Image (cartoon, rainbow, N blue to C red):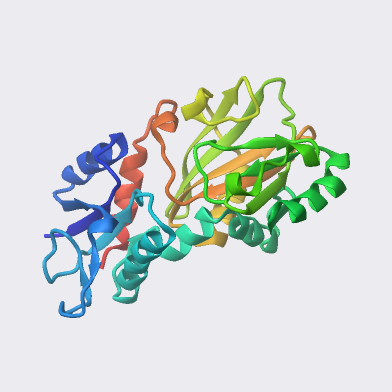
Amino acid sequence: MTQIALAIDEPDWHARVLLREFATRDVTVVPFRLADAAFDSVFPHGLALPGFGDRLPDAVLVRAISAGSFEAVTRRLGVLHGLRELGVPVWNDARAIERCVDKSTTSFLLAQAGIATPATWAVEGRAAAAVIAARECGQGALVLKPLFGSQGRGLRLIAGMDDLPPSEEVGGVYYLQRFLPSGAKNFRDHRLFVCAGEVVAAMTRQAESWITNVRLGARPLPLAPDAALCDLALRAARCVGAAYAGVDVLRDRDGRPWVLEVNSMPGWKGLQQVCSSSIAGHIVAGVLAARR
């Protein structure tokens, strides 16, 4: 019987709907926390995954990685690297997660792939960030984002040098991106959900402020993306190596689409509200198709 390892942080809504989808396919799923996995040279494969003894799963689906110290998160990603080296399909694997969690690497890869993305700078120290703000804010505001942040938390609009927070508030790293005003009357952008080389769901997020995260109050609206928008999302997911991803796209005042971020562990609770097909079902089908 097929055995899938599901890496979660806690048994939240996403974990529950994934487990239900796996159950309809007569698949054994073992939820576990990457914090509880171990490197163990005594084991035949050098890894010990909770619930698998000395065996390996047929595939691993990574829903979440618990927060922790730099050393702890590095070790957990190392477990995912190890599984891939052992031939176990991992959705998403450590390389894709690393490329997406570090927003500066995502921006670099998007730009190198010729994908329209806002001008971006990532530097260490407030003095270096102040030089950028002094030079660039005359052409328009910048957005300061936590390098490892998600769900719209910690975003700041930077209109000048004085808006830059102290270094200790941002871990010493300033990730700055050109602010692009939306062409719509309301604040809105798009989220496209890519899975196994296909856009399986999409929505427009409409908000009362420029931060358009559903968890922070944005309203999800149905979206039927055209071929060009789908192609943009697929290219963005491909350039970071993601098997599934949430791609955030903003249209500027001229209607041109820009990729803002690529999320390798995206949530879809809000998106599912305006999507008729099961997003978890698409993910499960993709994982099973990729299994050993």
Q: How many marks?
A: 0
Answer yes or no: is residue 107 visible. Answer: yes
Residue 220 is left or right of residue 260, and the answer is left
Q: Residue at x 17, y 53 (%)?
A: 30
User: Residue 280 location, x and y as percent?
Assistant: 33, 41
User: Residue 37 location, x and y as percent?
Assistant: 24, 62
Residue 243's place in the image compared with 10, above or below, is below
Q: Residue at x 61, y 30 (%)?
A: 211
User: Residue 89 location, x and y as percent?
Assistant: 32, 65
Q: Name the quadrant of the C terminus.
A: bottom left
User: Residue 183 location, x and y as percent?
Assistant: 74, 29
Q: Residue at x 56, y 29 (%)?
A: 204
Residue 138 is left or right of residue 90, and the answer is right
Q: Residue at x 41, y 26 (%)?
A: 273
Q: Name the quadrant of the N terminus.
A: bottom left
Instruction: Give whichever of 25, 142 is nearer the camera.
Output: 142
Answer yes or no: is residue 228 visible. Answer: no
Could you say which quadrant of the image residue 123 lies in?
bottom right
Instruction: Give whichever of 149, 109 is nearer the camera.
Output: 149
